[in-house]
Image: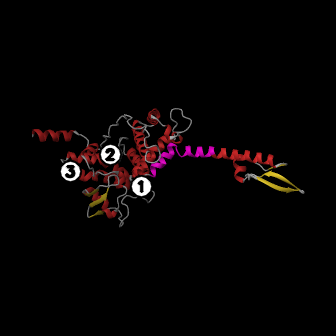
Amino acid sequence: MEKIKYLERRSRKGHYVWVCNPSDYAREHVGATYEQFDSREEAATHCKMIMRTVEEFERTREKQSKLDRETVDALFHFYTQHKAFKHKTPNTKRTYRFLYKTVASLRIGGANAVFGQVLARSVDAEMADKVYDAVREQFSVHRANGVCKILRRIWFTGRRGFLSPNAVNPFAQMGLSETPPRVILWEPKQVDQFIAQADKQGLSSVGTLALLCYHLCQRPGDMRQITWDQYKDGVFTFVQEKTKAEVKLEASPQLIERLSGMKQTKDGPVIISETTGRPYDMRLYSKYAAKIRQAAGLPEELQLRDLRRTGATELAEAGCTEDELRSVTGHMSRNVLNVYVRPTKKLAASAMSKRFG
C-alpha cells in the first residue's frame, strides 16, 4: 500500500477512520488543517492536494529567495566580500559605502522598487543613465560621477562569481563629464584667523589639526590619526593611509611651538577632541571646522582638505623641485601632484624669470 505523507489511520469509538494530519510547517505556511475522512481514498486525495500546495509554496519561495540573492544590494554585498574591496583603505571603504547608500534607496525612472532591490541582471545602459541623472538632480554632478564609477567597479567585480562572466557592464563607457579639480587655496592670514578662532572657542585641537595639514601638506584623515610616538625631535614619521607612502617631515618652528604646549602621551593621539576626549571622526571635525570658519568670518568654500593643496602650492612657489614636492606630499607621480599644486601668479612669474632672467 502506497505510503502518503500526512495520511494516518486512527481508532475512533470502536472503528477506524482516515485523517489528514498536516505538519506544523504545512499548517503555518499554506494554512493546512487537520481533517477526518470515512475512506482512505478521500483522505489520500486531500493529503496529496496539501502536498502539492506545499511544493508550490516552496518553489515560489525558492524563486523569490534566488531573486533576493540577485538584487543590486546582493551584488554590492558580494563586492564588499571580495578582495577588490577588502584591500581598500578604511577611509576608501567608508566612501564607497556612502556613495552606494546614496543611490540604493532611490527609485530610478519611476520603478516600483528602490535601486538596491532591482535585479542586478536587469540593469542596462538605459537604467545606468537614469541612475546618473537621478543622483545628479538630487545631489550634484560630482556625486553622480562618484556613484557611477563605484557601480562600474562593482559590476566588473561581480563578473567574478556573481554575474555571468560575459555580463555587460551597464556603467562602463558612460562618457561621464569630468568635474574640475578643486582650486581653492587658503591665504596665510586666513589660516591664522582660523587657528585663533579655534583657540578662542576652546577647540584648539581643530586649530592644531589645521596647522598640521597646512605645514606638513597632509590630508586631515592622516593628521587626525597622528600619534606622539610618530613625532620625535621635531620630526614626524608616518605612513599615509591612502597611498601607503612613508613620509618623514620636519615640523615648522610654529608647529613645534604649538605642539610643545600640548600634553603628550607616549603613544596616544596628538589630536583629541575637547568635547569627547577621543580622537575625531571626519563628521565631528568637519562640523567644528565649519563652526570655527563661520565665527571667523571666513569664506564658506574653505575646507580643511584644501590646506594640503595650499601648502603644496606654497612649496612650489618657494622653488621646490618635483622630487622635493613628492617627498612631502607622498605622491607617486607628477600627474597626481598636478591636482594639488595650483598655478599661481607667483609660479608664473618664477617661470618667466627662469626663462628670461
Looking at the picture, does residue 31 appear above or below residue 225? above
Of the 4 image quadrants, the one containing the C terminus is top left
**Front residue of 130 and 160:** 160
Marks 1 and 3 sit apart, C-alpha to C-alpha, by: 32 Å
- Residue 289 at x, y percent in the picture: 39, 48
Secondary structure, mark 1, is loop
* Local crowd size for mark 3, using a 10 Å CA cut-off: few (<14), some (14–19), many (≥20): few
On residue 306, which mark appears? Answer: 2
| Magenta-colored segment: predominant secondary structure | helix
Q: Nearer the viewer, mark 1 or mark 3?
A: 3
* Local crowd size for mark 2, using a 10 Å CA cut-off: few (<14), some (14–19), many (≥20): many
User: Which residue, as the protein is rendered here, is positioned at the far left?
Assistant: 357
Write the start and end of the magenta stretch as one range: 59-81
Marks 2 and 1 sit apart, C-alpha to C-alpha, by: 18 Å
Marks 3 and 2 sit apart, C-alpha to C-alpha, by: 21 Å
Looking at the picture, does residue 219 appear above or below residue 347? below
On residue 323, which mark appears? Answer: 3
